Image (tube, rainbow, N blue to C red):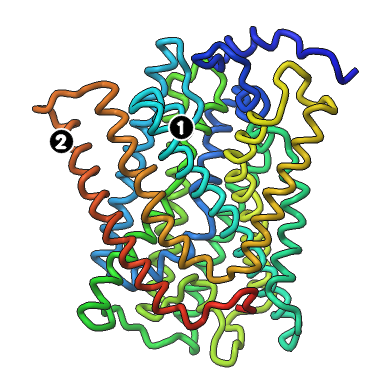
C-alpha cells in the first residue's frame, strides 16, 4: 500500500500555486506548506510567530529608554513591522497573480534579487534565526519548568539541563505533526494563552505595585553616559526582536488560493493581540518596577531571598500558561527546518504517510529537536547570543528586505512618498544592525564571566 503514487499530485500542486520554476514536484510545499488555511488560521499562525513570552522583557527595555522613549519605540516598531509585513504580502500576491506563487523567503530573494541571494544569504539567515528561536524557546521552557519546581521545592537539587530535557521531550513528540496547517488548532490555543499569561503578568505587576512590598520606583535611565547609549540600542534590539517573525512568506503559503487580502486580515488579528499584550505588560511592568525591571518581568515577582511576592498558585498558573504557549512557538519555528528536510529527503511521488516518507520525517525531525535541546542545555546563556542573532537576522528579514522587495518589484516613483519611506526605513534599520551587533557583543563580553557549559542558571 505504501508504494502507490499520490493521486492528482501535480494537479493539486498547480491549483495551489506550488509548481516551481523547474516544473518539479515540491515535497516541502506539498507536505509542510499545505495551502488549505483561511485568513483566520493565518492570524493564529502570525500571532504565535510574533507574540511570545519574549514580550515579558518589554518592561526591561522601557527601563533602558524611559517612559517617552520606550513608548515611542514600542509604537514605532509596531507600525513599521505591520507596514513591512503588508508590503511582503503585496509582493507575494503580485507574483501569485502572475501565476508564480512564492512560498518561502528564499524563493522571494531568488526571484526578486537573484539566485545567490536566496541560496547564500536569505535562506541560511532565515534557517539560522528560526533554529536559534527553537533553541531559545527550549531554554525558556526548561527555565519555566524549573521555576515551578523551585516554588514547590525551594531546596530541590535538580539542575536546569534536566528540565530542558523534559521540555525537549515534549517537543520531540509534537514535532511529528505533519504540516504547518495542522498546527492551526494549537496556534488558536496559543493565541488564548498569550492573552492569559500577559493578563497574569500585568495583574501581578499592578498588585505588587500597590502592595507594601512595592519597590521604590525610579523611572530615570541609570548608568554612565556610555552605558545609557549602549542600553538604548540594546533596548531597541529587544523591542525589534519582540516584533520579529521571519516566516511571513511561509505563513502566507498556508493560505488557500486565492490569497488576495487574506494576509491583511490575519495581520489585523495578530496586531490586535499585540496591542493588548505588549502595552499592558510593558506599561504595568515598568510602572511597578521602574528601572529595576528584570530581563523578564516574572523575575520581579520574586523578592529578597527568592520569596514570592504573589501567591504561589498564581505564579504556577502564569508559568504553566507560559510553558504551554512556548511549546506552540517552538513548533512554529520548527516549520522552516521541517520544510527543508521534506524537500531533501521525502519522495513527492509517494503518499505523505507512506513508510518511505514517514521514516525520514521521523528521523530528521527528531534529530533537529535533539540537537536544539542539547544546545539549550549546554548554553543556558543563549539569550545573549540571540540578541546578536537578532541584530544580524531579525532586523534584515523584517525591517529591511520587505522594503527592498517592494521597491524592486513595483518600482515606485522616486518622487513619491512610498519610495522614500521605504528607503529611510532601510537606511535606519541598517544602522541599527551595526550598532545593535556592537551593543550585543559588548553585553556578551560583560556577561562572559558567568558563561559555563551546562550551567545551572
* Residue with the mark numbered 1: 106
Q: Is residue 20 left or right of residue 315?
A: left
Q: Residues within 10 Å of mark 1 (few under 14, many from 20)?
A: many
Q: Residue at x 35, y 25 (%)?
A: 112
Residue 80 place in picture, x, y as percent: 30, 44
Q: What residue sits 35% from the left and 49% below the top?
A: 395
Q: Position of 401 compared to 249: left or right?
A: left
Quick one: 330 or 439, which is closer to the camera? 439
Q: Residue furthest right?
A: 1
Q: In the depicted view, which residue is nearer to us: 205 or 363?
A: 363
Count of numbered circles in the view: 2
Find residue 245 and report its horizontal and vertical position in percent: 46, 45
Q: Residues within 10 Å of mark 2 (few under 14, many from 20)?
A: some
Instruction: Say above or below: 277 vs 147.
Output: above
Q: Relative to 287, does residue 250 appear above or below in the rendering?
A: above
Residue under the point 50% across and 51% down: 51
Spot the residue most to the bottom.
305
Q: Quadrant of residue 53?
A: bottom right
Q: Earlier in the sequence, mark 2 or mark 1?
A: 1
User: Are circles 2 and 1 on residues that touch, CB within 8 Å?
Assistant: no
Q: Which of 224/117 is in front?
A: 117
409 left or right of 309? left
Q: Marks 2 and 1: which is nearer the front?
A: 1
Q: Quadrant of the C terminus?
A: bottom right
Residue picked out by circle 2: 420
Q: Quadrant of the N terminus?
A: top right
Q: Secondary structure at mark 2?
A: helix
Alpha carbons under labels 2 and 1: distance apart: 25 Å
Q: Position of residue 328 (x, y in %)?
A: 64, 48
Residue 281 locus on image (x, y percent): 45, 63
Residue 283's disc number: none
User: Which quadrant of the figure has residue 310?
Assistant: bottom right
Amino acid at each position: 500500500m505504501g508504494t502507490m503514487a499520490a493521486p492528482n499530485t501535480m494537479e493539486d500542486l498547480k491549483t495551489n500555486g506550488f509548481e516551481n520554476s523547474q516544473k518539479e514536484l515540491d515535497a516541502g510545499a506539498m507536505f509542510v506548506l499545505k495551502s488549505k488555511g483561511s485568513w483566520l488560521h493565518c492570524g493564529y499562525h502570525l500571532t504565535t510567530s510574533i507574540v511570545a513570552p519574549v514580550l515579558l522583557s518589554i518592561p526591561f527595555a522601557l527601563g533602558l529608554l524611559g517612559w517617552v522613549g520606550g513608548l515611542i519605540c514600542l509604537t514605532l516598531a509596531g507600525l513599521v513591522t505591520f507596514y513591512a509585513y503588508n508590503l511582503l504580502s503585496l509582493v507575494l500576491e503580485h507574483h501569485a497573480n502572475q501565476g508564480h506563487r512564492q512560498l518561502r523567503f528564499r524563493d522571494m530573494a531568488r526571484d526578486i534579487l537573484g539566485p545567490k541571494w536566496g541560496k547564500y544569504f536569505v535562506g541560511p539567515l532565515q534557517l539560522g534565526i528560526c533554529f536559534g528561536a527553537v533553541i531559545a524557546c527550549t531554554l525558556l521552557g526548561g527555565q519555566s519548568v524549573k521555576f515551578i519546581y523551585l516554588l514547590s521545592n525551594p531546596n530541590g537539587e535538580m539542575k536546569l539541563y534536566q528540565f530542558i530535557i523534559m521540555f525537549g521531550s515534549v517537543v520531540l513528540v509534537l514535532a511529528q505533526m505533519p504540516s504547518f496547517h495542522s498546527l492551526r488548532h494549537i496556534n488558536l490555543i496559543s493565541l488564548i494563552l498569550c492573552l492569559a499569561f500577559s493578563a497574569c503578568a500585568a495583574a501581578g505587576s499592578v498588585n505588587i505595585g500597590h502592595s507594601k512590598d512595592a519597590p521604590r520606583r525610579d523611572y530615570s535611565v541609570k548608568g554612565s553616559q556610555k552605558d545609557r547609549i549602549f542600553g538604548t540600542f540594546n533596548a531597541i534590539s529587544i523591542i525589534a526582536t519582540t516584533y520579529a517573525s521571519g516566516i511571513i512568506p511561509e505563513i502566507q503559503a498556508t493560505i488557500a488560493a486565492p490569497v488576495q487580502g487574506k494576509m491583511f486580515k490575519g495581520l489585523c488579528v495578530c496586531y490586535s493581540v499585540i496591542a493588548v499584550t505588549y502595552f499592558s505588560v510593558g506599561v504595568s511592568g515598568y510602572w511597578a518596577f521602574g528601572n529595576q525591571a528584570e530581563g523578564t518581568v516574572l523575575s520581579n515577582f520574586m523578592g529578597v531571598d527568592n520569596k514570592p511576592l504573589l501567591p504561589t498558585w498564581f505564579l504556577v498558573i502564569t508559568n504553566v500558561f507560559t510553558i504551554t504557549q512556548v511549546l506552540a512557538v517552538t513548533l512554529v519555528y520548527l516549520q522552516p527546518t521541517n520544510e527543508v528536510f521534506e524537500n531533501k529527503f521525502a519522495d513527492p511521488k509517494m503518499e505523505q504517510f507512506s513508510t518511505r516518507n514517514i521514516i525520514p520525517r521521523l528521523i530528521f525531525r527528531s534529530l533537529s529537536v535533539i540537537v536544539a535541546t542539547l544546545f539549550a542545555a549546554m548554553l543556558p546563556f543563549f539569550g545573549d547570543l540571540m540578541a546578536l542573532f537578532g541584530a544580524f537576522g531579525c532586523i534584515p528579514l523584517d525591517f529591511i528586505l520587505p522594503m527592498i522587495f517592494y521597491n524592486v518589484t513595483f518600482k515606485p516613483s522616486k518622487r513619491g512618498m512610498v519610495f522614500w519611506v521605504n528607503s529611510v526605513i532601510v537606511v535606519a534599520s541598517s544602522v541599527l544592525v551595526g550598532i545593535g551587533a556592537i551593543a550585543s557583543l559588548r553585553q556578551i563580553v560583560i556577561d562572559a564571566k558567568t558563561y559555563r557549559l551546562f550551567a545551572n542558571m
